[in-house]
Image (cartoon, rainbow, N blue to C red):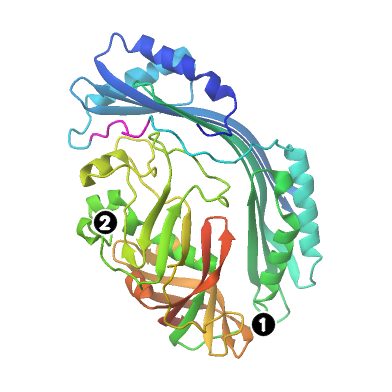
Amino acid sequence: MDNSNKNTGLSLEREYLRDTIHKNIKNLPIKQWDLGASCSSDSSVQVDNGDAKQMKSSQKSSITLRVWNREGTLGITSTSDLSESGLLKAINGAYQASRLGNPNEIPQFSSLAKDPLPKLERPVKDSIGIQNLFKLLKSAEAELLHSHKAIKTIPYNGLAEANYSRLYINSDDAYRHLNRSQSTLYLYARAEEEGRKPRSSGSIRVALGTTELDINGCIKEACRKTLSHLNYKPIETGKYLVCFKPEAFLELINSFGSMFNARSVLDGVSLTKKENLGELISVPFLNINDNCLHDANVGASSFDGEGTPTRNIPLIKAGVIENFIHSEATAREFGVKPTGHAGLGAKVSVGLDWLEIGKTPGKLTKKQTLNYKSQSERFILIEGLNALHAGVKASQGSFSLPFDGWLVDNGEKISIEAATIAGDIREVLRNILHIEDNQTITHHGICPHIWVSNLSITGEA
């Protein structure tokens, strides 16, 4: 059991939910059932020049209920009404839906839904309240605005905290429960100079609680990154040596997450196929793991939507595609165990959690001398990728994305006015020259600076 669990609303309602459902399915031809429940308390604020732009607090509770009728087909329904009458409506709705269920797509209980859970050290932190959130964000905005005369506004900002609980139970007596807290701060500044285009950048911090957020670090990073783009110039179109900062490379790999998604593979919308397991798809010194349990992952969970324990899954090991991520249904199709990446649904979705990217131990890279801090050779340093929703064709492998970054020549960094990077993710993985040793922790994974040769950059006049 997750050692951060405490008796909160959902844990106390376990017996109520189970007993209510048992009582009300007696007169229906239901073979088995399971449910996922969640409740949360959220507060968030945004400010505009010291005034409250938005202040929100909410409390939410909901369940997703699945039932299998005696013919074996599945129905699903969701509700936020946890009263007995609300649950009765949900049961009847799910049963009626099961009569129309797809007989060719029937998930079952996870075979690991009753296995021991990994232990996670994620103590729940107390909320500080919406008024205190407003005061902190107002102060952070003021400090960032006064950090440099060129910074005129902080158009996008927010400070939020949440306490939430998740629960999974099924008619086979599986039971999972966890409590979590999380706080997030983001500051996105806009700098302006006379006769020049406005330039923007920002920073994000995530922690278990608001009192643990590195607010000063977020302010300083947002200021430094924004000012670094003031001295901008256009860039010529051509092929370049590119160094991806950790955040940018994580964004790129996550955009092509369907490569590792067994659901996408079975649906024929992935670059990879079942037979690609065990094949070399990148340079042999690249490792990529999906490690939800990493100590730096604030939002780590010990189980997925089907109650399967989460674990560290090697996706690429020494350049070889080692595993896909699975739900119960896809794992059954592949003849393997589920990996702890599933949601809860009729056709269960699967998604990546938290990537850990690094160099294969004992393997040498192609160009050991590359270092983004001291490289004398001309290169492009990419800070972040934009328009990922529109510029990535995940099923084809291609991408064409505007980016924020610099042209670095003999140590001089010049911000790029506007440019697009384009290529194929398979070529990127095969053309990695070097993976630096120092890994950087971000809010969605851990990764070092990664060097790739011969990438196409299109400058925009």
Per the image, the residue denoted by label 2 is: 269
**Residue 213 placement (x, y as % from top left):** 70, 50
In-image side of 77 versus 121 (left or right): left
Q: In the rendered view, would you say 190 is above or below 268?
A: below
Closer to the N terminus: mark 1 or mark 2?
1
In-image side of 170 versus 295 (left or right): left
Would residue 126 be counted in the magenta stretch? no
The total of numbered circles placed on residues is 2
Q: Secondary structure at mark 2?
A: loop
Q: Nearer the viewer, mark 1 or mark 2?
A: 2
> Dot 1: few (<14), some (14–19), or many (≥20) neighbours within 10 Å?
some
The part of the chain drawn in magenta is: 106-113
Q: Residue at x 59, y 41 (%)?
A: 121
**Residue 398 placement (x, y as % from top left):** 34, 70
Residue sitting nearer the eye, 252 or 190 = 252
Q: Residue at x 41, y 64 (%)?
A: 287
Magenta stretch: helix, strand or loop mostly:
loop
The amino acid type, in three-letter code, at marker 2 is Val
On residue 231, the disc is 1
Q: In the rendered view, would you say 240 is above or below 359?
A: below
**Residue 176 placement (x, y as % from top left):** 46, 29
Cα distance in 3D space between marks 1 and 2: 42 Å
Q: Residue at x 73, y 80 (%)?
A: 194
